[in-house]
Image: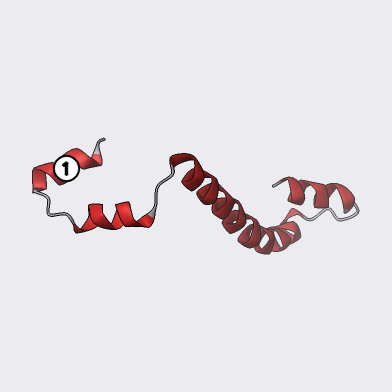
Amino acid sequence: MYAFQLWGVINQSRKADEVELVYLIPLMMVLVPTVYLIRAKLFNKVRGDDLKEFEEDLMAKKTIWRQFKDLFR
């Protein structure tokens, strides 16, 4: 969003907001996944989870009541 605002300040000669939306969509298509990837990597380092534990949890047989309780932990 800051990059878009900076682009708006640099290009103040244009007055049409509709045209700026055309530039915003490709910019957000790059920035949003990048920020999410960085967040996921940091979150993984902080929590220390690995995929083996996740797979074991998925493969474990659980009752319906246990699945319901796991939703709220």
Q: Residue 58 location in percent, x, y?
A: 23, 56
Q: Residue at horizontal 44%, vertical 41%?
A: 47
In-front residue for pair 39/12 = 39
Display coloring = secondary structure
What residue would you read off at disc 1? 68
29 left or right of 73 in image:
right
28 left or right of 17 in image:
left
Q: Residue at horizontal 67%, vertical 64%?
A: 26
Q: Residue 50 location in percent, x, y?
A: 39, 52
Q: How many marks?
A: 1
Q: Residue 20 location in percent, x, y?
A: 75, 57
Q: Residue at horizontal 86%, vertical 56%?
A: 14
**Which quadrant of the view contains residue 19?**
bottom right
Q: Does dot 1 land on a helix, a strand or a loop? A: helix
Q: Residue 71 location in percent, x, y?
A: 24, 41
Q: Residue at horizontal 54%, vertical 45%?
A: 42
**Which quarter of the figure is the C terminus placed in?**
top left
Q: Is residue 50 above or below residue 43?
A: below
In-front residue for pair 58/8 = 58
26 left or right of 43 in image:
right
The outermost residue toward the right is 13
Q: Which amino acid lies under the numbered mark 1 shown in the image of this protein?
A: Phe
* Local crowd size for mark 1, using a 10 Å CA cut-off: few (<14), some (14–19), many (≥20): few
